[in-house]
Image: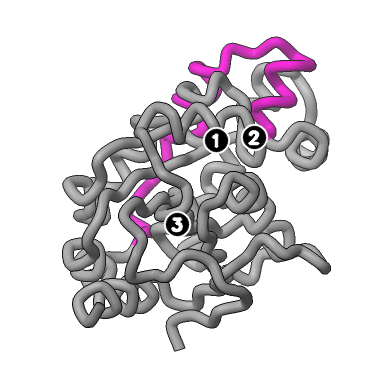
């Protein structure tokens, strides 16, 4: 099964704006691309702060827990240049990301506008979308720079995102692998879809009521939505 519905939101057939996270959402977490990003973060911390590899790993994890992203912690505590950080950590090998013809076809068949909202950078997103063969499917990319370096799940950047693209939340749906990042989308009236990855820190917390759909197969979920639109 492509997805299960936990609670009702906007009918999938009525969605006219589709918002997608990037990393571990538009490609499978199992390809371990994000592990490359994490390793680059460790190397950046070692070089800039002069700490051991073990200390860099612990600092990366602590900043992620305490500040939402490792970069946010480095900016606030260590005053690093975020542009230098983003360029360094996103210099990764995309060959590990597998082709996904079913996703290409599902996005092409899916009516409505498609947007990316990522805690990464526009160059990283553009490289990945081109690699996957889906760059032309998307009308815009809202990245961490556009969010003024305030990462998801902060509410203010979500409001800025909605304003920039003129999104009507009642007919918009957001797809994410990190469950907590869907909370502000739901609070603003969007329907949400959580992509299961098996990663502990991305999972739904007990009692969370902001997830409408749980997705096992993103391409299948989008194909089902396109079918609903065609059949009314």
Drawn side of residue 61 relative to residue 38, left or right = right
Q: Which mark is residue 173?
A: 3
For label 1, the crowd category at 10 Å Cα-Cα, with few meaning under 14, some 14 to 19 and many 20 or more, is many
Magenta span contains residue 85:
yes
* Screen quadrant of the C terminus: bottom left
Residue at image position (56%, 65%) is: 194
In the image, 1 versus 113, the foreground residue is 113
How far apart in space, not on screen, are marks 1 and 3 (Cα)? 13 Å
Q: Which mark is residue 1?
A: none
Magenta span contains residue 28:
no
In the image, 131 versus 47, the foreground residue is 131
How far apart in space, not on screen, are marks 1 and 2 (Cα)? 5 Å
Q: Is residue 48 above or below residue 177?
A: above
Q: Is residue 88 visible?
A: no
The local secondary structure at tag 2 comes to: helix
Q: Which mark is residue 158?
A: 1
Q: Which mark is residue 155?
A: 2
The local secondary structure at tag 1 comes to: helix
Magenta region: 69-97
Where residue 67 appears, x then y in whole percent? Answer: 76, 32
């Amino acid at each position: 099964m492509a997805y299960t519905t936990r609670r009702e939101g906007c009918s999938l057939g009525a969605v006219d704006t589709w918002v997608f996270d990037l990393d571990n959402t538009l490609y499978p977490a199992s390809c371990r691309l994000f592990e490359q990003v994490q390793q680059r973060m460790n190397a950046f911390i070692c070089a800039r702060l002069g700490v051991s590899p073990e200390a860099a790993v612990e600092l990366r994890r602590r900043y992620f827990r305490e500040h939402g992203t490792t970069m946010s912690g480095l900016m606030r505590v260590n005053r690093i240049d975020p542009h230098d950080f983003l360029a360094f950590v996103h210099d990764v090998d995309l060959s590990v990301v597998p082709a996904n013809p079913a996703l290409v076809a599902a996005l092409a068949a899916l009516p409505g506008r498609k947007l990316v909202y990522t805690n990464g950078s526009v160059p990283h997103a553009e490289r990945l979308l081109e690699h996957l063969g889906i760059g032309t499917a998307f009308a815009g990319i809202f990245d961490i720079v556009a969010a003024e370096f305030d990462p998801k799940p902060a509410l203010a950047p979500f409001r800025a995102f909605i304003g920039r693209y003129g999104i009507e939340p009642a007919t918009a749906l957001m797809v994410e692998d990190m469950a907590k990042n869907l909370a502000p989308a739901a609070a603003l009236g969007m329907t949400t879809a959580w992509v299961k990855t098996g990663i502990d820190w991305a999972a739904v917390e007990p009692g969370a009521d902001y997830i409408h759909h749980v997705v096992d197969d993103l391409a299948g979920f989008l194909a089902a939505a396109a079918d609903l639109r065609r059949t009314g």
